[in-house]
Image (cartoon, grey):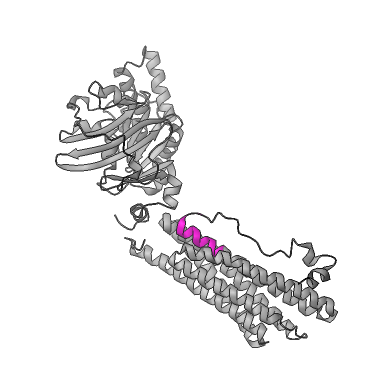
Amino acid sequence: MSDLHIVSQFQRELDAIKAKIIKMGGLVEASIVGASASLYNRDAELAEQVRAADAAIDVLEQQINDEAARVIALRSPNAEDLRLLLTVIKVSGNLERIADYSKNIAKRTRVLLELRSIEGSPAALRRMAREVELMLGDALNAYVQQDQALALAVIERDEAVDQIYNTLFREFLTFMMEDPRNITACMHLHFIAENIERMGDHVTSIAEQVVFYASGEKPTDERTKADITSSDATLSGMNPTRSIGAE
Amino acid sequence: MEDGKMVEPQKVDAPVRPDIDLAKLPNATIGDIYVENPRMTARQVRVNYGDKTAIEDVSLDIGGSEVISFIGPSGCGKSTFLRCLNRMNDTIKTCKVSGDIRLNGGDIYAPDVDVVPLRARVGMVFQKPNPFPKSIFDNVAYGPKIHGLADNTGHLKQIVQEALERAGLWSEVHNRLDDPGTGLSGGQQQRLCIARAIAVSPEIILMDEPCSALDPIATARIEQLIHELSSEYSIVIVTHSLQQAARVSKRTAYFHLGRLVEVGLTDKLFMKPQHEMTNNYITGRFG
């Protein structure tokens, strides 16, 4: 499907929108990396940069949506062009939300710098963020190449992110029970873990859009949600020590 | 309509191959050419103009009460195929049609078929509105009269009124039925032609770019009319407007270089066509 449009201006408009999505994706990847590094290195300046960089991402989302709406109105696109435009609107929304989570992590990092540090957790959070960032990179590559197989592989990988989140959830509970002075920091760290877990969900949603863009069909298989903290009482119930002890 | 110019129906013998599953042929149409309880069936239709093959191996069902659009670049054979369905091609001397086309199971190219009643059963509306140079009333009354559908003058008036009502024209012309049909606006003339076609109670209405000479409002009226008529008649519409095909039809058939490349539900075909040629055409990647 590499043929070009007869109306070259139409082709340029589609190419420009695609380029903006890639640019936005690049900024969002940098934002994830920045947020996680600022947390791990206790780097206030980097955290501030991440917060400041979010504005540019918001602007890009608005531009992409405006241009997609304009092309739909003026060009009456069909088939792969229509699918591209329908998906850029959703993908830009997902990217914008991911960037918001990065910004939120950066904010909490500033607070955490004032609190006693919790051993081990920032490293696990960094691993989790690294996985989400790699997934996002692959989802965006799949988007550019309309690569359905790669997109489906990304969807599968979200389970690993959920697993890290489950582990961290238990870890934070343990720290808080060991010493109530850990509670404030652990609450912030838990929100950070949840933010990264939600990022993974948005990356998954992007990958699902790629499948639709490439094939015209939404992925049908209900994907396994491995985040069980909200449904498993042994993780958050009355006597969590037992389940932790069982590990 | 041009019955006086009619030449002998021409049917050349070509092997019809019911034993071959067309869907498995390498060049076969993508998508489901079949419908349940088809009103019309076309199998391996081939049309030659002299030495030149206009369409080749086109097989397609047309269902009862469905709207199907034929799209494709100029010269792809969509109008040629449309004109086979009520034997309008008979008027072209060099034109030879082979294959098998049936209306409710009856071969429309059988030697004993009279094309005049056939064209009442399979009516046609053309690109340019072509009312007869007669009154509005006579334009609509002409068909029922020659086909002997009216028992008396009162019945004829009733048929004319009903046809004009169904064509959405009655309220605009009821007080001037004796005015010439040619005095109406383009959109009204086209609806008059539709009234003329439905006055003889057809089973199928063929439309060859019925809106290409009309403004957007007149086009919208015709499209609304197509929608209303589709509960009763099968409508086959050839259009160069992809958006029109998308708006009015349940199924769409894409023709290219005399072949039926792909047929399918319109929403599927416009969202995710299966064949690359279909994709390229509907996205404007070639002419």
Picture layout, residue A154 above or below residue B182: below
A213 lies left or right of B33: right
Indicate the quadrant containing the C terminus of chain A: top left, top right, bottom left or bottom right.
bottom right
Residue A214, by quadrant, is bottom left
A84 w.r.t. B132: above or below: below
Q: Main secondary structure of the magenta part?
A: helix
- Going 31% across and 32% down the picture, which residue do you hit? B124
Which region shows up in magenta? A205-217
At 45% across and 38% down in the image, what residue appears?
Answer: B224
Q: Quadrant of residue A62?
A: bottom right
Give x and y (percent) for residue B50.
14, 39
Give residue B234's position: percent from left, percent from top.
40, 32
Q: Is residue A112 left or right of residue B100?
A: right
Q: Is residue B92 magenta?
A: no
Question: Is residue A165 in view from this perspective?
Answer: yes
Closest to the observer: A223 or A209?
A223
Give the camera-side residue of B60 and A247: A247
Instruction: Say whether residue A69 is visible.
Output: no
Q: How many marks can you see?
A: 0
Q: Residue furthest front?
A: A246
Residue A138 location (% of width, % of height): 51, 71
- Which image quadrant is residue A203 in? bottom right
